Image: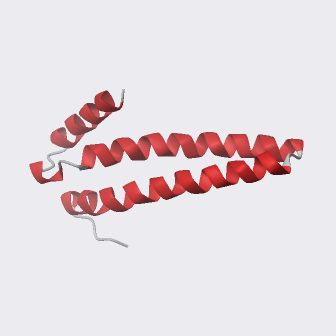
Amino acid sequence: MAVEVRDELSLALKIAGFSADTASLPMHLSEIEEEASTVLDLFTVLRSHAYRGDASATQETLAELAIALEHLLHHVNEALPGLQKELDIEPE
């Protein structure tokens, strides 16, 4: 499935007129999509554990969330400069 998503994102970038030197961008965008989904799922699990008062499960989920956020941040940091360059957007 990851390859299919990457191919779809490659097509989207091609249609948007992105240059060929952004070859790694679809992979990073695919990873961002996957990690963002994981982060959202973990927030749901976190709230559930906290609601039940399960301190151990809450702490474990927070650790998983920290790891997922770190992975998300890595791919965002890799993808964002290329997106900004291709879209002629100044970094904030």
Q: What is the x, y in percent for residue 4? A: 30, 27
Numbered label tally: 0
- Name the residue: 43% across, 42% down: 33
> Where on the picture, by quarter, is residue 5?
top left
- Name the residue: 46% across, 53% down: 72
85 or 69: which is nearer to us? 69
Colour scheme of the rendered structure: secondary structure
> Where on the picture, by quarter, is residue 2?
top left
Vertical relation: 47 (above or below) 66: above
Q: What is the x, y in percent for residue 48? A: 78, 40
- Name the residue: 78% across, 45% down: 57
Residue that lies at the very extreme toward the bottom in this rendered image: 92
Q: What is the x, y in percent for residue 60? A: 71, 50
Question: Left of 80 or right of it: where is 17?
Answer: left
Question: Left of 87 or right of it: where is 65?
Answer: right
Residue that lies at the very extreme toward the left in this rendered image: 20
Vertical relation: 81 (above or below) 44: below
Which quarter shows the C terminus? Answer: bottom left
Vertical relation: 64 (above or below) 91: above
- Name the residue: 27% across, 32% down: 8
Which quarter shows the N terminus? Answer: top left
